Every structure is written in C-alpha cells, then in structure tokens.
Amino acid sequence: MNAELIDRARGFAERELLGRERWFDSKPPAPTAASAALHAAGLANWWLPAEYGTAGASLTDSVDIVSELSYADAGFAFSSFLSVLGTTMLRLYGAPALAEQYLGRMAAGGGFCGILVSEEDAGSELGRTAALFTAKGDRLVLDGDKYFATNTDAADFLLVAARSAEDDAVFGVVLVPRDTPGVEIVKRWDMIGMRGSATYQVRLSGCEVPAANLLRGHGLRLLEAGLNASRILIASTAIGVCRRIRDLAMEYAAAKQVKGAPLLGNAVFAGKLGQVEMLIDVMRNQCRSAAAEFDRAMASADPAAALYRAGTLRSALAAKMYCGQAGWEVATIGSELFGGLGYTHDHLIGKLVRDLRYVGLVEGGDDVIRDLLYTRYVIPTAKRR
Amino acid sequence: MNAELIDRARGFAERELLGRERWFDSKPPAPTAASAALHAAGLANWWLPAEYGTAGASLTDSVDIVSELSYADAGFAFSSFLSVLGTTMLRLYGAPALAEQYLGRMAAGGGFCGILVSEEDAGSELGRTAALFTAKGDRLVLDGDKYFATNTDAADFLLVAARSAEDDAVFGVVLVPRDTPGVEIVKRWDMIGMRGSATYQVRLSGCEVPAANLLRGHGLRLLEAGLNASRILIASTAIGVCRRIRDLAMEYAAAKQVKGAPLLGNAVFAGKLGQVEMLIDVMRNQCRSAAAEFDRAMASADPAAALYRAGTLRSALAAKMYCGQAGWEVATIGSELFGGLGYTHDHLIGKLVRDLRYVGLVEGGDDVIRDLLYTRYVIPTAKRR
Amino acid sequence: MNAELIDRARGFAERELLGRERWFDSKPPAPTAASAALHAAGLANWWLPAEYGTAGASLTDSVDIVSELSYADAGFAFSSFLSVLGTTMLRLYGAPALAEQYLGRMAAGGGFCGILVSEEDAGSELGRTAALFTAKGDRLVLDGDKYFATNTDAADFLLVAARSAEDDAVFGVVLVPRDTPGVEIVKRWDMIGMRGSATYQVRLSGCEVPAANLLRGHGLRLLEAGLNASRILIASTAIGVCRRIRDLAMEYAAAKQVKGAPLLGNAVFAGKLGQVEMLIDVMRNQCRSAAAEFDRAMASADPAAALYRAGTLRSALAAKMYCGQAGWEVATIGSELFGGLGYTHDHLIGKLVRDLRYVGLVEGGDDVIRDLLYTRYVIPTAKRR
Amino acid sequence: MNAELIDRARGFAERELLGRERWFDSKPPAPTAASAALHAAGLANWWLPAEYGTAGASLTDSVDIVSELSYADAGFAFSSFLSVLGTTMLRLYGAPALAEQYLGRMAAGGGFCGILVSEEDAGSELGRTAALFTAKGDRLVLDGDKYFATNTDAADFLLVAARSAEDDAVFGVVLVPRDTPGVEIVKRWDMIGMRGSATYQVRLSGCEVPAANLLRGHGLRLLEAGLNASRILIASTAIGVCRRIRDLAMEYAAAKQVKGAPLLGNAVFAGKLGQVEMLIDVMRNQCRSAAAEFDRAMASADPAAALYRAGTLRSALAAKMYCGQAGWEVATIGSELFGGLGYTHDHLIGKLVRDLRYVGLVEGGDDVIRDLLYTRYVIPTAKRR
C-alpha cells in the first residue's frame, strides 16, 4: 500500500475540499478550481501509469484515495476518478499511438476522458445502443444522442459506444476528441446528489474522426473491462461518505445530552455506530479485494486479453452492489441520528444521504448487477466458487 | 366512513395541488393560496366539531383525507392537519370559553394553531423543557426559545409548553395569541423535504397572556393526548406518498421497455410493486385502527379524562413508527425504480423520498417511540395484549 | 368483539396447552386429546354458524382466538382452525343439503374438514392441478395424488380440488367422505415446525361419490373464497407466537444481569422489545381489518356471490404476507435474545422460530402473494386505492 | 494461497462428509470417525505450525478449508477448527516446554483442545467469570462450573479461564489435562444446529495442575488474541453453508417448473441467487482480509506481544458479525425457495438454516460485537480509519 500517496490525498482533501461541502452541493461550474488544485498536487488521474508523469497508483491504492476524497465530497471524487473507465479501455484496446497521444495529453493537463454510453431508451442495456458510426473512407462518422455522460464538457476526449451503421451486430467504442465539430452539450443534468460533479446530455451530429480511433474488440467487452475499475471506485466513494457520517455522529454525540447523560455513552447509539463501523470495514475489504483482482489482471502478461476474457469481474459487481446496499443502511441510520436538525439544510447529513444514493444507481442498478452475477457466475457451474 | 368528504378531499387535491409539486417543493411563502382554497372548499380544519361550521370529520376519516392530500403534496397536508395537535388539547383541557373563542375564530378563518414545544437542547425530551411561564397577578408571562415550530407565523394562536418559574415540577401548556407582543419569528427553517409546510425557530420574550390561558393538567399528559392525533395523521401522510410512488411506477412501467418487453410484465418489477401494495394496505389499516381507537376515546363520556388517563396510545405510537419504517422501505424501492432519471430533479421521486423521511423523525424518532412502547406497554404486565 | 369467547380461548390455552409445548413439538399422534378438550370446551370449529351448536364466532373474533391458542402452540391452533378453508367453501358453494349434513356432523363431533389441493409438481399453482374427477352416471370418480394435506387422517370429509377428465378447462371442488374406499394416507410429513398439527401425503384411487358432492362454480374461485379465511387465521398465528416471544423475553430479562444491571433496564433490549411490540400491534390490526372485510362480505345479501366476485381479498393477502415478514423479524430478534441457551432445545425459542417460519410459506409463499397483489390490485387502475 | 491444501479439504469433504448430513444432524457420539479420517488425511489441526507434522496452513488458507468442510457439515467443521482458539493462546502465551508438549501430542494424535470460558451467569461477559484458581505450593487448584464448552470430552487438554482466589483482579488462563481428576462432564447440550459438534456443560472440582500451566498475561487479553482466529473461522462456516444453499437452489431450479417455464430462467429467482452470490463473495473477502491481518501479526517479530497489544481485531469482529448477518439473509432467502418440501425434514434446507443461526450467536452475539467495535475502534479517534 502506497501510504504516502493516500496521506497526500487525505491532506489534499483536508486542505482543499473540507468545509466546502455546501459549495460543491451548489452544482458549481465544471471543472472546479479544486480539479486544478488536484493536478497541482500531482494527484490528477492518479491511476495512469507513472510513465505519464502521474502518481501511478494501483487500483487497490485508488480505493483509499477515493475514500479520502469522498470523505470531503463524493461528487468531486467521482469527477476525479471516473475517467478511469475510459482510460482503461484506451490503454488496453486502443492503438498504441492513439493511447499515448491522448493519455499523455490528459496526464499533462490534468484533463478528463468522457464516456458516452447510456441512451434515453436503452437505459443500462448496452445491447440496445442506438448511436451509430458510419465508415467514410478512412474516417468514421458518429451520430447519436447520449443521456447521462459525466465530465463531457471539460473532457479532452470522449469514448463513444456506438453500433456500426453497416452491420447491426458490430458494436464498437470510438475515441472522439472533445473539440470535434458536431459534439453538442444539450444540457447539464440537475442531479439529486453528487452535485460537485457534472453530468450532461450530449448529442453527436456527424462527428468525423480517423478510423484508427475505433478501439479493438467488441464494444460490450471493452466496456465491461473498463467498468470493473469504475464500479470498484464508485463503490469506494461509499466508504468515504460513511466514514464522514460516522465522524459527524461522534462529534454530535460528544455534545448532545440524552436523558441527562452524554449521547456518547448511550447503548443504543453505541450499537448503531458499532454496526456502521462493521459495515465500513466490510466495504473497504470488499473494494480492496476487488481492486487487487483487477490489479492482478493488469499485471498479467497480456492484460488486454485477460480482461477481455474475464469480462465483468464478480468481485467488482459484488463491490458495487454491496457498497450501494451497505451505504444505504448507513444513510438510513445516519439520517435518523441528528434529530430535527438532521432534516434541515443546516446539517450536512442530508447531502451525504443524497450522495450515497448514487452508488446503487450508476453503472447498473441492483437488478442489473444481480442479473449479471446470476448469468455469469451462478448459472455456469464451473464459475461457482 | 364519510366517503363524500374523502372524495371532496381527492377532488381538491386533483384540482388545486396535483402538478404543483415543484412549486410546493420550492419552499413557497406560508400560508399558500392553496390553504385559502382548502378553506373555500370547506375543508380547512376538517376535524373540528361540525358545530364550528367545519366538515366535522372523525380522525378515522382524517386518515384518508390526509392520504388524499399527501398523494399530491405531503408538506401541504402536514401544514393543513398539524393544528389538530393543539386543537385537541384546547378542546379537552382549555376553559370552555377559551376553547370556543379560539377554535371558533380559527374555524371561521381557516386559520392555524401553532405548537411551541421542542427546544434546541431538549430535543424530543419534553421533560427537559426550559421555557418558563411566570405568574404576574392574573397574567402569565412567557419567555423561552423554541426550536421547531410549524405554522407559527400564520397561526391565530400558539400553544406553548413551558415550566412554571415558581415551581420547577409544574409543566404546563399556555395559549398565546399570535399577535401577542414578544412573539418573534427567529427564522424559517430550510427543510430537506415537506417544503410545502413552514417550520420556524421562535423566541418568546415577556409575552403576557391572561392566567386563564393556562390549560388544565400536567403539560406532558396534555401533549400526549394531542400527539395521539397528530402522530396518526403524520403516519397517514406516508400512505399518500407511497400511493403516489406506486402510481408513478406504473406509469413509468407502461412506457418503459426492459430486455425487449414492457417493464409492466417484468416479474422483478411486479414483485416490488406487490410488496409496495402490501405495505400500503397495512399502513392504511394501522392508521385507521389507531384513529378508531382515538375516536372511541373522544366519543366516551369524558374524553378529557379518558385521554388524560390513557396518555400516549400504543396504536398511535405503532402507527407512526410503522409508517415511518414501511414508508422508508417504499422510498428505497422507489428511488431505484426510475433509472438514472430518478436521480435527477427532472423526476418527482427525489422529492417524494425526501418528504417520506420526515415520518420517522418528527414527533419522536424511532428510538423515542420504541422506548415509549417498552415503558408504557411492555413493562407493565397488565398492559400487554 | 366477543370478549367472553376470547377469554374462554385464553383460559383453554392456559389450562390445556401451556407447558405442553415439548409434547406438541414431538409430533404427537393426531388428533390429540387437546382437540377433544377443545370440543368439550365448546370451542371446536368455533367459526361455524351458531345454529350448528358451535360458538358461532366471527372471523374478526377468530383472529384473537387463534392468537390465544397460538400463544401456547401454533401447531394445535393451525389444526384447530384450518377446516375454515373447507367449511367456507361448503357453506357458500355446496348444495344446502350437503352442507347441512356434513357441517352438522362436524360441528356435533368436533371433527375436521381436510383440504386436498397441493400436488407435487403443481406446487402453489392451482391451475396445474392433475387430479381428475370422472363422471360415471350420477357418481363422480376421483383419482390423483395430493402432496400436503393437513388434518386428512382425522377428517370427517375432504374437499378435493380436481380437474374434469372430460373437459380440461373444468376445475372443480368435490366433497369426499373420509371413509370413502380409495382414500389412502401415503405418509405423514415430518415437518420442521407446527408439529402439533398433522400434514399428510394422500392418494385417491377410484373414490366414488355422488355427483351432488361437486361444489358449484369454478374451483379456483371457490378456493380463493375459502383461502381468504384461512390465510387471515394463518397470519393470526404469528400474533400469538410473537406475543409468546415477547413474554419469554421479559421473563428472561427480569432474571438476567448484563454489565451489572438487570437486562430489563438495558436500552438496547428495550429498543428491541419496543420494536416487537409495534410489530405485534400492526399484525393484529391488519388481521382484524382483513377479517372484518371478510365478515362484511359474509354478512352481505348474497355472500356466495360477493366472495365469488371478489376472489382473493387484498387485505387477506396483505395480512398473510405481512405477518410472515413481521413474524420473521420477531423470530430473528428473538433467536438472538437468549444467549447460548437459546441455541439449545432446553429453551422454547427454537420451536417458536420454527413455528413462525410456516406463516410465510403455506398457502402461497411471498412471491406468489406479491404476484397476486400486483395482478389483481395494482395492474387494474380501478382497483388501486 | 495453498490451492493443493484447499483441494485436499474439498476432496475430503466430498468423500467423507457429503451425503452424511442427516447423520451429523443426529447428534452422533463425539468424536466421530470423520475426525479420525481427517487426521488420516493429514488435515487434523491444519493450522498448527508445520514443524508439528501438520499441514501448517495459514489462517487465510483456513478460511477456504473451513468453507469446504462447512459446505458438507458446518458442525463437523466447527469441531475440527475450534481448537485454534486454545492452540493460539498456548503457542503465544504458554511456556515453550508446555506448548511443545501439548501441541505436539495433539498434532500427533489428531486431538482436541477444549476451551472452558462461558459460565451460566456470566454469559459472554468474561469479566464476570466466577471459576477460581488457588495457589497451593507449586500447584494450582481449579474449581468452577463452565456452561458451554465444545470438544471437551474428547480433548487432550483444556484451557480454563479463571480468577485468582487470592486476588480478584487477577484473571488467568490455565491448561488442565483432560484426564485431571475432578474434570466432570455434566451433560452434553442438545443444540438446535451444528449437531455434528459436541458442546458440554462441565464442572471442575479441585483439579490440580502444575503452576507452570498458567499462561502468561491477563486472561482477557489472551482470550481476545485467540478469539481473533476462532471468530474468523466461525464466520467462514457461513461461506460454506451459503455456498451449499446456492447449489441446492440451482439443483432444485433445474428440475422445477413455474408458470410453465423452468425456475432457472425465472427473473425473481435469478435476482435472489444474484444477491446470494454477492453476499458469498463479500463474506469470503472479509474473512480472508481479516485472516490476512491475523497472519501478518503472527508473522511479525513478536506475535505474542503484537496480538496482546492489538487485542480483538476490528476485522475479525467485523467478519463474525457480517457473516452472521449475511448468512441469516441467505438463510431467510433459502428457507423460502423450496416450497412446502423445504418446511419438512425431507429437505436439507432446515438443517442449513439451523446451522447458520449459530454464527451470530457464538463467541459474542451482535450486541456484544457492536459494543466492542464501538468501544475499541470508534470511540478512540486515533483508531478510526
């Protein structure tokens, strides 16, 4: 474990993020100055290989980095790590020159990679994607509407999931520079939580890119490879937010009297915090275990092949689903701890509950995840363990 | 059951409230024009005896009236029924002339009765109330800070829980006309949900009222008598909000395709809605049963004595706690049903989840209610049933 | 409410059942002497109309009678009330002479009516019933294997669900006297709980009965009419068992010290018991409300038509599902309350947990009930309330 | 990971345990022939250092060994691993000669170490232990009654928690050879589940042992050091039992038809199994992570000091509590999956549910664990993470 790096992330969060929760919750223009500060601290895109000049952290370390950032603001954490979904795909399945060019630029500038996958009608079902790419000489032309896309506006480049106009069975992922003519931000969504990040509805109209911008392999498999990383880090945001709730509760209990005694010594309160502590420990170990599995695949002889074959990792699915559920249990406990004040915007708990809710919703709701676990890991006898 | 009255409430909600959810959620100035419309429809303060010229509904009927109003906006419903807590105390324990004067005026004008009980340090522990009333000839002088008080600004009169300055053991409830010099609205709280209602922090400084404004009996007992009614109706708001979630889900499912088939026919979706329907039915029956118990006490020979003796009713405690928990189960299911859109302010579900949260928090969180149930109804062997 | 009758049931339970839990749990031969004692006490088949010389209780009163019996032994209660499923069908849909003959005999002797519905392959899906009835002059011949059938061996008569051999679409219910040649008890099941009742696997081979023994109407509708009553009383067993767990817990807590203080004063313990008390109150009100709806239908001008039209009542479905879930919550709490001793057969809690489990399983598991609620009461807009 | 060893454990379970569940559930005399077979397979006391001639597995590997054994019979697994609690204490805090003598004998014979801690009045509160040890020259005399003690009868030696008769504040752990005069088995408990293991009530009357048999250090700290290992392996039994439930469910679903289609393709069933798969993955990762933390402490320069200082490990507490809760969630799902047959002793699920229940009860119920987590890891700010 890279303790120095995690300490740096904690220090950054304390210095640049803590105390600014209300501001992040106000849906500030993206990217925020905090993103620039993250870059200045040498932490932007920390998971990219160190040869790009970044911190070069493993996904295992990223779990704790995300926990530290999310302790202060989960939305900021989300916008800071979500590019991992795209950069993983680009590193593994992009032409080397393409990867080097775009990852290098992104690392140098502390920029973002946007992911354009979800569509209004398709929801989480990637197989129903309607966006199209059409071959035109040695160029590809992209057209389509994308529903929820985070970081798009500030991104250096976008990775777009689309179907071949020539062959309905071909589903690919194409790199589109953000400044390509035809990329239009339709609107920024007004989200319930995670308002320190920015998510957009986007339209692509005749966006032309070189044919070499098409990543190798079937789009669904590429996405599954990348989603392993992002789902684990989404799960990790729950760790940070739940730690924050725990600490806020302890602060409150130190000051609060119940039945003439400090709340801190109240057995019912103690029981709730004991349960929360257990959940935090289990969340952390599940995220770290899943991340370690991902890191092992990335350290294998041919990570692109290994992850292409593995597809969506059981441990990553379990991490996201578990942290969504455990996080919601903590949110439910937390939202009852602070009395009437906890039901006002004068208290932070409301924001934390809203932020936590996203873990179970993004990149596959629980029904989708359960279905994937069943189909991939329960039905095939050989995969059971 | 007064079906006509409940139909009238439903009609009112459809006409005056439905479709204005965003406006109610914007924390509009109180009271809203909708309150005037409720009065115009003959529904304001519907639970007051018909001799005051109101609809004269039983608490049992009030369960369904609140459900109909809450279907559209729970905050509006809350502000419309919460006066029941005070009017119940005034009817039962106020001097007849006092009750007639203030209830009559309130019924005629469609006004409100504010309740000033909670304090910053005391939280839900009424026994720790710090506000004081001091005898001064045939007058009483009230001083103290009250933390959460709904409808105060627009109220005709306030019922204030306070301790006697002369005798710390004497705890009473005093009627203070809203326009009494010294009643100061410190601020309106910015609540997380129920934003169609208005809750205030209030200061009383040397407010003088006639000594006859002191209600008969120990303040805690009076409050418990009144809380029976308001807790049952708070519980009932959950019925309305959950019915709304169910109907929104069915609307969504009629349009939504999953795996190439309408969501309406999806077995997992069906199972969730079946569970929701069960919870709604149980909430409704619990609220109606508790309300019927209250109505029986009010119809007894000496309702003031009956409720003073009974104190807090088991069924009313159970109704509030159950509806808080069942409502949160529905909120949790509901907040996962609508995909990504359900995590934006473009969809109503976020507001409904925030509104639902209050049921488990106001007028005693679950820990307080569990403690009351244990102390009053489990410990005494004779009370067990 | 017939308080005298309920008191009589309580007295009977205290006198004849309490303290004999281990014996009931030993799977004693059926019927037990306790059944004869119930008849001697004038309580056997208490729900039959008083003109048959029984106690003539409403279903609403039956909720509390079942709660009192189940407090002592839920298996005994189950065997005592389950005939209500068949007697309801016979009263409403049997030829008057047939009903009078068999209900009269059963009332006089304190006997039982067995229900033969479930089959090994069909499970809870009544529509897949394979047993057949064949017309043979003015006789019907029944053949088929039935899987779970309670009280069969000791019954006066059986009501058998079967399909017409001539017309696959015709599904009927036929009364078969227990002593009809060809009725064979294959085995008595060794159940996990409810061992004070007796459930059998049964084979019918060429059982001949008069054609007039076929009840009027479609078998599924008849069953649904009768299941309303039995499901509500199955739900009611949970009330009794949970009350017993509560009282055992209080007895234990009066004697037990934790951290140098009586468990009775422990806040965590108090919180659990407060939650249990709430659940008991809600279960009781739901069962009574559902029973009252059934009683209203039975008191209508044409109860047979009313229940045929209504089919399965929402409130009865909700009662069974809710009490199964709430009962299991109490079972889970209870199974943790008694320390290591609670994990031995020296303590009663193990039996109570096993008994409680059946509520969610018999006469439709939760998945089946949720599906019924969705199909019958959520999909049809007009049925929503 | 020692895959060969885990495979050996799986092979052993398939060969010697699978299919004998009913026999294990019959409370067979202890130790069973299967224990001898485990020794013959070189697997008895597998966690002892390899220099004793055992398999020499880490605790991390033990998680999977226990999962494999518990897949077949959790009671057998429990009796096979529980000695780890005592051997850990003896290795770390016993005089070297004492440890070598007794661990060597136990390893050679495939024997057991009994732990005598719990008492009838003290429950899980070790601080209230009443058993005494009295110095008598260079001998110690032990007296006291112990309530729940597994493997005692068949054990080579016992580790007894007792208080000094001379100084009430001194609380120690003393090694007592099983054949010491005065060790009396009062009775074998009739447990609800885990009946393949044997747990006894034991009396010590004037048992004399050498003074050197007193382990070094405060008894509570020694126990906490050892409980880390046993709690993690108790948690691990839940993994095996839940895997078994999953596989039984899949077998059942392959044969069962619902609504004319195989249950295997039913979306509600798939959702339940997906949830179960998630829970299994999280349980496994938590147990492995906790075991790895324990293994790191054991591999440190001075493991006795390290574990004495650390006391009860957060991860071990979290593992036991989490697996108890998650296991019960799986038990609840599983107990509803198999229809009516699942409520009979003809089906295995009843036993599995009874077995699972113990995880949340032994070696500290959830209330005790929550209190430990709160006191040790939440209250001290420096320990929070």
Image (tube, coloured by chain):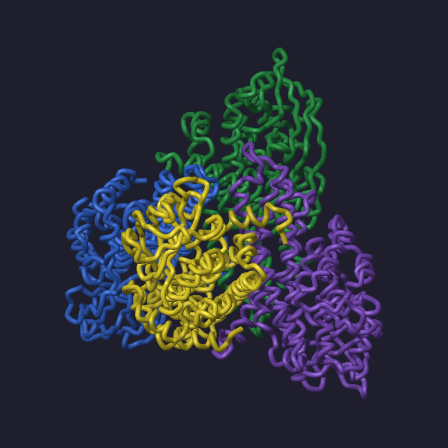
Chain colours: A blue, B yellow, C purple, D green
Relative placement, left or right, of D183 versus D312 is right
Name the spot of residue B239 as percent of width and height, x first. Answer: 46, 66
Q: Among all residues in the image, which is located at the extreme top?
A: D137
Q: Is residue C30 visible?
A: no
Left or right of A172: which side holds C68? Answer: right
When asked about the image quadrant of residue A200, the answer is bottom left
Q: Position of residue D170 (x, y in %)?
A: 54, 21
Q: Quadrant of the N terminus of chain A?
A: top left
> Looking at the picture, how far across and down is residue B11, in whole percent?
41, 77
Q: What residue is rendered at 71% in x and 53% in y?
A: C72
Q: Is residue D17 above or below residue D54?
A: below
Give the answer, above or below, for where B236 lies relative to D58. Answer: below
**B192 lies left or right of D309:** left
As drawn, the residue found furthest toward the front would be B137
Q: Residue furthest bottom?
A: C137
User: Residue at horizontal 55%, vertical 55%?
Assistant: B305
